[in-house]
Image (cartoon, coloured by chain):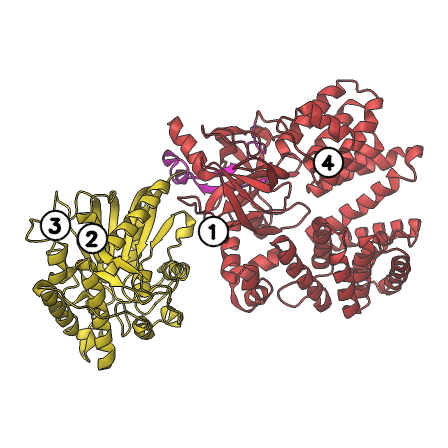
Chain colours: A red, B yellow
Amino acid sequence: MPTLPDQSPQTLATSLLAGQCPDVPPWEIASAVDWLLEAMGPFPADDLLAGLRRAAAALNGSRQFAHAQRLASGWRDRAALDPSLARMQAQALIELGSLDLAESLLQETVATRPAAYANTEIPECQGLLARIAKQRFVLTEEPRALASAASLYLERYREHGPQAFWYGINAVALLSRQGDGGWRNLATEVREHCLTRHANDDGDPWLAAALSEACLALGRCDEAELWLYRFLQHERTQPFHVGSLDRQLREIWRGSLVGSGNRCASRLVGIIARHRMRTEGRASFSKQGLDAIQAGGAAARQLEKVFSAEYGFSLATLQRMVSACASIGCVTRRGGERLGTGFLVRGGDIRADWGDRPVFVTNAHVISDEVAGAIPVGEAMVTFEVEAARATVPAFYRVEKLLFTSAPGQLGARNDRHDELDVSIVWLEALGFEAGLPTAAQLPLLGPKAKSYVVGHPLGGGLQVSLHDSLLLDIDDDGRLIHYRTPTEPGSSGSPVFNGQWQVIGIHHGGSSNTPRLRGAGSYEANEGISLAAIRHKLRSLQ
Amino acid sequence: MKREAAVVFVHGLARKPAPAKLQEIWLWALARDNPMPSVFPPPNAGFDLAMGIPHHFNYYADVFYGEDYESDLGSYYEATGAAEIVAELGGASGSGPMPQNERERAFLEAFTAKLAAQPALSPVLAPVAATEGEKQLELAGWLPAPVREAIIKKAAMEAYYFLFNKEYTRADGKRFHVRDELRQRLVREIEAALKVAEKVVMVTHSMGTMVAYDVLRNYPPCPRVDTLFTLGSPLGVKEVQDELCAPGLRRPDFPDERLEKWINIYDPLDPVCGADPRFASDYSPVNGKSVRDIRESNWGSWRHSATHYLAGTRFRSELGLAVGP
């Protein structure tokens, strides 16, 4: 949707109610959601419900899960449980990593047994419960969690038959992890059904994905590869679909780019990794991968072969990324939803009198007492995934003090006062480890080879680091806004933006396919970061 | 958005690759990490100007050689630098210098003799240290006589044409008054650099150092420059100083009016420096400012290589200080 420079919250909210998610930065969507929450009033009218359902669907569809969650939760706080909104809220919560909340909401919804939704929302809710169980297994590796997940998926498959092939294939994957011999017949059944359907109509990319998994299960590796390529090339396959299959292959099938693991699944994981490098300029790493890179040696060289110099990610690049990861954190709320990213730098690198103590930097639209949709300072918590993966109990750090905050302005809007920086800088309580990213003294020069890296934690479970290698598009004349081309990923707000030498030059805060250009008229697809230089400049002027 | 500093590079003698290629080579030489661990202890991190320092290349090889660009580029990337000698000798150079008067003749004779006397151009074992205080014996390299003579002849020719502002007729017939032309080109680059940065740092090599000193000392249109780096410079040769000395002075001096700092990086076995690679004591200080001589190894058999000078830890460290706030 085209973005007009002055879209009011009401206008944006109207689009949402019509089922369209406007292509605007997250803080503007937050304002639209605020407007809708106000419009609901204490006793929302029933005729608003249809529009709210469309809005939630649009937000989920655009991966704006935090906002979908807030909207659906707003209805829930004011009115009776709506199964449709509840299901969408649960989907959002799952994507945000808040499994417990999602689970209790789904169980509550299923328990009410609303007759009108018996064939629609309730089965979907049950399917989501199976997904939560699978995710719990991935996080805990407990056999009971595995058994629970396998049986939930199997129940769903039996209930709906072969046409619900996605339940079937998940059951196959989980049963095979259990070592339950029954998965072979099931895999054959799923494969045959999907082959027939695909022959009649190849419009659903998930058929190809399921076929790839089924062939993997049956040991037909070449065929699994063929179906994987078909899935990757399918015109309706989106990047997050690929991410989803990637996680399945790694987390359930134990495919890996390093070490042994399932050989066939590892081949498929390698194919996906190269595909994502080529099409998205990005690489994702599991904890295993990060450890291997850090250790160097044979496993690291294996990884380097995949992310080889021709794609710009050498082992040196990967190693610098791994050391940067220790300082990159997830911003969450008490319920555990992952709502943003941020990073540690030495305080003195931003403002001289902040000395050696690390400060945590994120967007104001992620942590703020004033910006719509942001986590209030008192409720925000930060977890450092690399540290968490190594510890037995993940540590959540609260904010000790808000040092500086500046609300966001409009995307692409020039501002020579070094205002509207969309940044919040805080001290965290009792940070138990040494960390801090190196910062650049200058902004890089622009040019055909000027590149930047953005490292973030994508949504959707497990320790994953996403490394984007993107082209620097432009820097405004005030040295405040940086434009680069990277795949957009909600939840990566607050990610550090690095120059080619792995020094932080800015903080990622949003983007769209219609970001106003920094020079001249018109707009283009671009992501935007606020430069560290502008933040430093502002802080100096306040001293 | 004006940057803190910009760098203006000025290349040296002999035929060069095409401008874009030469720039690419120099930037590569400066940016590469740990280029010579046996000479400069690691890490010796590279200096990547793309991280925020605009850079301009003053190019003038075409004055002498037109578009007959150097195309055998392998030498520039080689560690030894020996092959670079061969590369530098190639190319048409037009007719040889024809001195018009006694002064010119005397210059040519003395300059040529000084280069010929260089130990680096004869088979001598000489002590060489990568850094001050270390002792390490190294073969200085033996060059065959015709190669030696060609190098000397080329250096003398370029210096002569510049210092005496001779009119040079290029092989394709185009003519230049060499000193005028080179001065104008360099000042244009400095002015362009000052449009994008608050201050200019010059990194100059070989004959380029003569052009740089000349504009800073003797050419009023030249804007103020913050720091001058001279690498492998013949500015220590008395005959060169005599021609660049400001009128009315007996000795050359620090160009205080247009320059803040001057750092001279030299390898004692650099043949183009003549027998006088260090010259802090030759240039009279002005307002407390004087040249700083810093010794740094250029390693290999050809001690004049620009890419080797750009790899040095001390040079890189000083450059970092110069372009910083």
Which quadrant would residue B238 be assigned to in this image?
Answer: bottom left
Q: Is residue B269 left or right of residue A451?
A: left
Q: Nearer the viewer, mark 3 or mark 1?
A: 3
Which quadrant would residue B24 be assigned to in this image?
Answer: bottom left
Residue B299 place in picture, x, y as percent:
28, 70
- Label 3 marks a residue whose chain is B
Proximity of marks 2 and 3: CB atoms separated by less than 8 Å: no
Q: Which residue is mark 2?
A: B213
Q: Element at badge 4?
A: helix
Which quadrant would residue B165 be assigned to in this image?
Answer: bottom left
Using a 10 Å C-alpha cutoff, classify the residue at mark 3 as few (fewer than 14 neighbours), some (14 to 19) or many (20 or more).
some
The range drawn in magenta is: A339-368
Q: Element at badge 3?
A: loop
Discs 4 and 3 lie in a common subunit: no
Using a 10 Å C-alpha cutoff, classify the residue at mark 2 as few (fewer than 14 neighbours), some (14 to 19) or many (20 or more).
many
Q: Which residue is mark 1?
A: A502
Discs 4 and 2 lie in a common subunit: no
Separation of residues labelled 4 and 1 (CA atoms): 34 Å
Q: Element at badge 1?
A: loop
Separation of residues labelled 3 and 1 (CA atoms): 47 Å
Could you say which is closer to the camera, residue A464 or residue A533? A533
- Label 1 marks a residue whose chain is A
- Numbered badge on residue A59: 4
Q: Is residue A22 left or right of residue A486?
A: right
User: Which quadrant of the rendered structure holds the C terminus of chain A?
Assistant: top left
Q: What amino acid is at disc 1?
A: Trp
Using a 10 Å C-alpha cutoff, classify the residue at mark 1 as few (fewer than 14 neighbours), some (14 to 19) or many (20 or more).
some
Q: Is residue B46 left or right of residue B305?
A: right
Q: What amino acid is at disc 3?
A: Ala
Proximity of marks 4 and 3: CB atoms separated by less than 8 Å: no
User: Which quadrant of the rendered structure holds the N terminus of chain A?
Assistant: top right
Q: Which residue is mark 3?
A: B246
